[in-house]
Image (cartoon, rainbow, N blue to C red):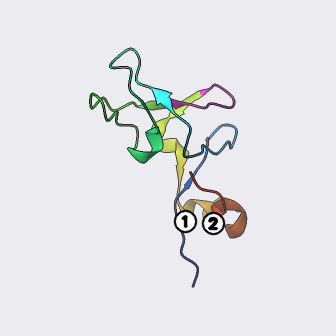
């Protein structure tokens, strides 16, 4: 049995963030962190960011739109292996 996991990728261009990718909490506290480890909540000051900028295409999307679940993959017609192979 294959263990299915959440797939994280940009909703606009499909870019997948890596574990070492960081964003800064500006103009709030300046903390740099991986926003996908905390679902957009800054560990430095607790601000929950509603949007996240893609480091590839530079466009903003709602933070929650980056999270794609196995059911979403099936419903959108993407192959299971294709949609679930890479994760942040």
The extreme front residue here reads 20
In the image, what residue occupies the spot 49% across and 29% down? 23
Q: Quadrant of residue 15?
A: top right
Report which residue position mark 1 lands on.
Answer: 71
How far is disc 2 from disc 1 in space, using C-alphas? 5 Å
88 or 49, nearer to the observer: 88
**Dots 2 and 1: beta carbons under 8 Å?**
yes
Disc 1 is placed on an element classified as helix
| Residue 54 in magenta stretch | yes
Q: Is residue 25 left or right of residue 77?
A: left
The prevailing secondary structure element of the residues shown in magenta is loop
In the rendered view, tell whether residue 82 sits above or below residue 46.
below
Q: Is residue 34 left or right of residue 21?
A: left
Report which residue position mark 2 lands on.
Answer: 74
The extreme top residue here reads 27
Q: Quadrant of the N terminus?
A: bottom right
Q: Is residue 30 left or right of residue 60?
A: left
């Amino acid at each position: 049995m294959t263990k299915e996991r959440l797939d994280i990728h940009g909703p606009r261009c499909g870019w997948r963030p890596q574990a070492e990718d960081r964003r800064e909490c500006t103009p709030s506290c300046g903390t740099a962190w991986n926003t996908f480890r905390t679902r957009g909540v800054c560990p430095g000051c607790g601000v929950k960011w509603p949007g996240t900028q893609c480091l590839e295409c530079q466009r903003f999307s709602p933070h929650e739109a980056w999270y794609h679940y196995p059911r979403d993959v099936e419903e959108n017609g993407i192959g299971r292996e294709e949609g679930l192979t890479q994760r942040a």
